[in-house]
Amino acid sequence: MTSDPETSYDTPRKFRAPDDEWEPFEAATKAVHPEGRSPRGRVIREFMRWYMRRPGSKLPERPPVGPWSAPARPEEGQ
């Protein structure tokens, strides 16, 4: 029996991102994909497939300009 990759749970992975990028990223992905349990995961998987040049893969759709478009705070040392 196979499961639907859009609705089944994947093995959890750690992904490090500052809150001022991770939280707006969630809002931006929900603007494009309002249904589903994890639009961030969906967009990251689409990007990974495109990055690895998997057949038929495309860059994920980007949201329109919104509050998430403001620059994040500069990282220390930059």
Image (cartoon, helix red, strand yellow):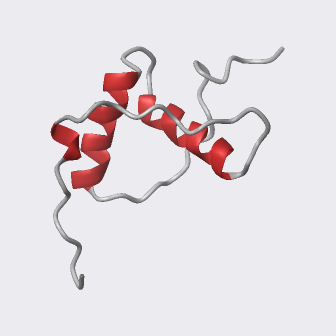
x, y percent for residue 53: 74, 48
Q: Which quadrant is home to the C terminus?
A: bottom left
Residue nearest the viewer, comparing 4 with 59: 59
| Residue at x-position 79% and y-position 37% | 55
x, y percent for residue 65: 23, 35
Is 28 left, or right, of 9 in this rendering? left
Number of numbered discs visible in the structure rendering: 0
Is 37 left, or right, of 51 in this rendering? left
Query: Which quarter of the picture shows residue 38?
Result: top left
Query: Which quarter of the picture shows residue 69?
Result: top left
Is 66 left, or right, of 30 in this rendering? left
Is 59 left, or right, of 69 in this rendering? right
Is 71 rendered above or below residue 22? below
Is 33 rendered above or below residue 24? above
Is 69 rendered above or below residue 34? below
x, y percent for residue 50: 65, 44
Q: Residue furthest bottom?
A: 77
Q: Residue furthest right?
A: 1
| Residue at x-position 43% and y-position 29% | 39
| Residue at x-position 52% and y-position 35% | 60
Is 23 rendered above or below residue 2? below
Residue nearest the viewer, comparing 46 with 10: 46
| Residue at x-position 38% and y-position 24% | 32
Q: Which quadrant is home to the N terminus?
A: top right
x, y percent for residue 63: 34, 31
Residue nearest the viewer, comparing 5 with 14: 5
